[in-house]
Each structure stands twice: as structure tokens, then as C-alpha cells.
Amino acid sequence: MNNIIDVAAILISISALFAYINHRFIGLPTTIGVMVIAMLVSLFTYVLSLIGFGDFHTEATHLLEGIDFNQTLLHGMLSFLLFAGALHVNLSDLSKQKWVILSLATVGVCLSTFLVGTAAYYLLDALSCHLPYIYCLLFGALISPTDPIAVMSTVKRLGVSKELETTIAGESLFNDGVGVVVFTVLLMLLNMPGELDAAHIALLFVEEALGGIVFGLVLGAVGYYLLKTIDNYKVEVLITLAMVMGGYGLAMYLHTSGPIAVVVAGLLTGSLLRKHVMSDRTRQSVDDFWELIDEILNVILFALIGLEMLIIPFEGQWLIAGLLLIVVVVMVRVVSVGVPIRLVGLRIRVAPHLVKILTWGGLRGGISVALALSLPPSEYRDIVLFITYIIVVFSIVVQGLTIGPFIKRLTEV
């Protein structure tokens, strides 16, 4: 049952069923509704095991343990979802907000990593859940970037101004790449203490971040040449698919940031190739194809996040820590968003209520869970994973459901 075809068939079938139930009877936004239903099913399965129906729970747990969430998301779904998200972000609109987005994706992520990690260290120590400082920083790194998948699915239904939508989408598309780089550096420090110095760390940042941007530009240029020389919508859709899958894989092989490379390629494809190279029929086919890919993978991912509840380790004391750290993460988000925006705002105009909206709209999602699962097995991994899961669930369900009314109220004032 653990071969990839069987697992994919089960996940797609479950996701389709949950999406139908949500649309037919509940009416929540699709991704959030699917995740809530998946969590309720996980809870129901656990209750069944307590009253003597353990076989079903065992089979479900066995299935989920056979799915490498980290590989499935970071080296599977992520490239498709980032490209699909970047495809509809206007490059000229993005350039107008470049300093805001750049400061949020760099200064904001690094500042948040340090503040969350330090606060977590002292808070957990006060709760007698001692966690080494390096693990607290890793937690800060994985929880700091907003998840482009969760954010983009929310932004699409809000109807906010173009300026605000571009800022929210741009930050979420780029800060996950930076967050993964910061997490990778900290993980190397954990695995190779004393072997990395400032020069090695700086070089790694250049290779990953700047290398990802350069490789994304090259990928976009190759795509431009190929698409310009033909007019066949089937082949052109296939080329965009190759840009994503082949480009992401090659970027990772070259030790550059695959997420950043795919985002850059997606921005170029959406703003340049769609307008100047593709025919109307090709443009419509590309849009329809990637919109469908985006919707399907989003539903599957959020169903998987909800089902992961079955295998997340749990202790009562961790729940208290997780609930307190929800407050810490939101408070730190105010600072990590507010400081860069205040600095940038001294020179350029920023959208009204931007700090408030970015703070509450900074949803965490599957990337945080995947990074937590990528931590090496140790006595500290389980608590980081559980706290991450608690914050992600709160972020998607509570913040995701209230950000729309929150923005509407702010814009009406």
C-alpha cells in the first residue's frame, strides 16, 4: 500500500471527498474546510482506537508514516505551487513594492528568527521544557516565513487593493526561500558545530539566495526562447511544466534555492512570456492548466496537514507551550514587519494599515511543518514539531478565517 500510486490515489480520493463535504454542507473556504474536516476525521479515528476499533487507526497511521511530508512538499508540491502563485503577480506592480518586499523577506525573516528563537528559549525553560538555543533558533527560522501556499489561497478571495495584494503575495513568495536558507544554515551549525565560520555562512547565503535569482532569470530566458519559436499550446504548456520540474531539480542540484528560482521564473513567465510570446489560445491554456494544478495541490496539501494530526507526538505540557508561543509569534510578527516597513516608509509611501494586515495575514502552513519534520531525530525534535503544528493550525483556521473581515473593517474606517 506504500507505493506512490496507491498513496496518491488515496490522498486524491480523500481530498476530493473532503472538498465535496465542505462545499455541500459546510461552506468554508475550500482549503481551510478540507483541513478542518481532515483534523476531525483524525480525531474521530483516534477516538475509535480508544473504544476498541484500533485496526483502522493503525492502518491510517501506517499510511501517513509512509508519506515523507518533507519530501512531498519541499521537493514535490512546492515548485508547482510557487510557480502557479507567481504566474499571476504582475512584475511591474511588484517592482513598485520591491523595497518593502525585499526588506520583509530579508530583515524581517532574520529578525523574526532571532526574536522568536530567543523568546521560545526562555519560555520553554520557564515551563521546564528545556530546549537548546540552537533548536529554538531552528524553530524561529521555520515558523518565521509566511507560507505562500496558505497566503495566496487567502489573498485570492479577499478582493483587496492591487497594491496591498502585490505586497502580501510578493512577501510570501520570497520570504519562504529566505526562511529555508536561514533554516539550512542553522541546521548545518547543529550538525557541524565549530566547522562553519562567518565566511562560509555568507557564501552559503550568496549561493542559495542570489544563485536562485540568477538561475531563475536563466530559466526564464530559456523559456522565452523556446516559447517564442513555436505556436502550439500543448507543447508550450509542456514547456512551462518542464521549467518548473526540471528547473527546480537542477537548482537544487546546483545548490541554489529552488523556491527562489521557480518564483523568479514564474514572475517572468506571467509578466513577459504570457503577454509578448504566447498566443491568446496558449495564454488561456497555460492559465487554465496552472490554475487547476494550484487548486488540486492546495486541497491535497491541506488535507494532508489535517491528517498529519494522527502522527504528531503529544504531551500536555507541550500544549501550554504551544498556546503561549502562538501569542509570541504574533507579537514578534508585529515587530519583524513593523521595523522594516517603518524604515522603508521613511523614503516611499506604503499602503495604509500595512503592518496590521501583514501581521494578522501572516499565515503559516505546510512549509513550517515540513521543515520541522526534516529535523534530525533527537529528544528535542518532537516538541518542536508539536508546537509548530499547533501554531500552523491556529494560523490557518483562526487567522485564515478572520483576515477577510479584519481587512474589510480596516479599509472601511
Image (tube, rainbow, N blue to C red):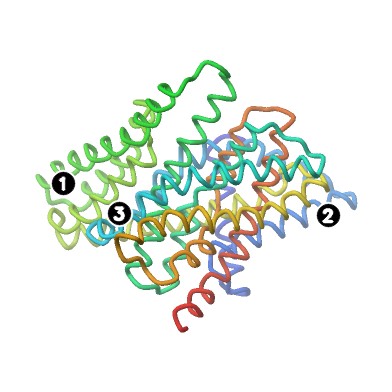
Mark with earlier residue (1, 2): 2
Q: Which residue is depicted at the point 48% across and 36% down?
A: 182
Mark with earlier residue (3, 1): 3
Report, in whole angstroms, how far the alpha carbon at label 2 lies from the one at label 3: 50 Å
Q: Nearer the viewer, mark 3 or mark 1?
A: 3
Instruction: Determine which residue is flagged by label 1.
Output: 227
Q: Is residue 301 above or below residue 140?
A: below
Q: Amino acid at mark 1?
A: Leu
Furthest residue to the left?
229
- On the rendered structure, is 285 left or right of 405? left
What is the x, y in percent for residue 395? 60, 59
- On the rendered structure, is 235 left or right of 11? left
Q: Which residue is depicted at the point 71% across and 57% down?
A: 41
Instruction: Determine which residue is flagged by label 2.
Output: 47
Q: Secondary structure at mark 1?
A: helix
Q: Badge 1: how crowded within 10 Å, few (<14), some, or many (20+)?
A: many
Q: Is residue 137 above or below residue 188?
A: below
Decide: marks 1, 2 in contact (CB < 8 A)? no
